[in-house]
Image (spheres, helix red, strand yellow):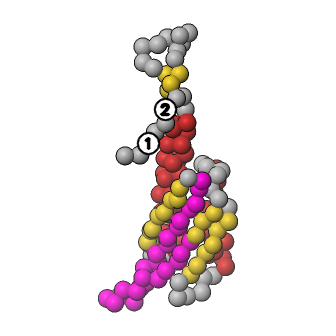
Amino acid sequence: MRLQMQAIHFDADPKLLNFIQQKLDKLDTFYDRITSGEVFLKLDKNDNTKLHTKLLEVKLYVPGGTMFVREQGTTFEEATDLAIDTLKMQVKKFKDKRNNARAPKVLDGATEDEAVVVLTEETEE
């Protein structure tokens, strides 16, 4: 998957970028039609403490839609792991919706021998 990574107001270490790339490449095992993505790395400056909260935003593009997640953590690695968990659920849900929308439906009460297949087109309301 082709990823475009942007570190906002700082220079990201190449090791961090490789870590994020490797983690996001694992999403291909759940849905192989992910075309590309964008990753934004930000430092959230807190006035009360000198620690910076790390923000990670990921936008994935798939045919027919996009998936977006925003996570924060004490390190970018922690935020990446949280984002991967959320994206796994989103990818699985998206894939199930796509497969269920295309699957033919059998009318209730029909036996297998006389099963009537009804093709429906789902509309958004």
- Residue 103: where, in percent of width, then height? 55, 32
Judging from the image, what secondary structure is the residue with disc 1 in?
loop
Residue beneath the point at 61% across and 69% down: 20
* Residue 15 visible (yes or no): yes
In this rendering, the answer to whether 73 lies above or below 93 is below
Tell me the chief SS of the magenta region: strand
Going by the numbered disc 2, the residue's amino acid type is Thr
- Kindly identify which numbered label has been placed on residue 120: 2
Other residues around mark 1 within 10 Å, as few (<14) / some (14–19) / many (≥20): few
Residue beneath the point at 43% across and 72% down: 72
Residue closer to the observer: 111 or 117: 117
Task: Please state the extent of the stretch shown in magenta in the rendering.
Answer: 39-63
Asked if residue 52 is among those painted magenta in the image, a careful observer would answer yes
Along the horizontal axis of the image, is 24 left or right of 97? right
Which quarter of the rendered picture does the N terminus lie within? bottom right
In this rendering, the answer to whether 95 lies above or below 6 is above
- Residue 125: where, in percent of width, then height? 37, 46
Asked if residue 10 is among those painted magenta in the image, a careful observer would answer no
- Residue 106: where, in percent of width, then height? 49, 22
Residue ID for mark 1: 123
Residue beneath the point at 52% across and 15% down: 115
Residue beneath the point at 53% across and 10% down: 114
Going by the numbered disc 1, the residue's amino acid type is Thr
In this rendering, the answer to whether 120 lies above or below 43 is above
- Residue 67: where, in percent of width, then height? 51, 59
In this rendering, the answer to whether 117 lies above or below 122 is above
Residue closer to the observer: 98 or 88: 98
Whether the residues at callouts 1 and 2 have beta carbons within 8 Å, the answer is no
Judging from the image, what secondary structure is the residue with disc 2 in?
loop
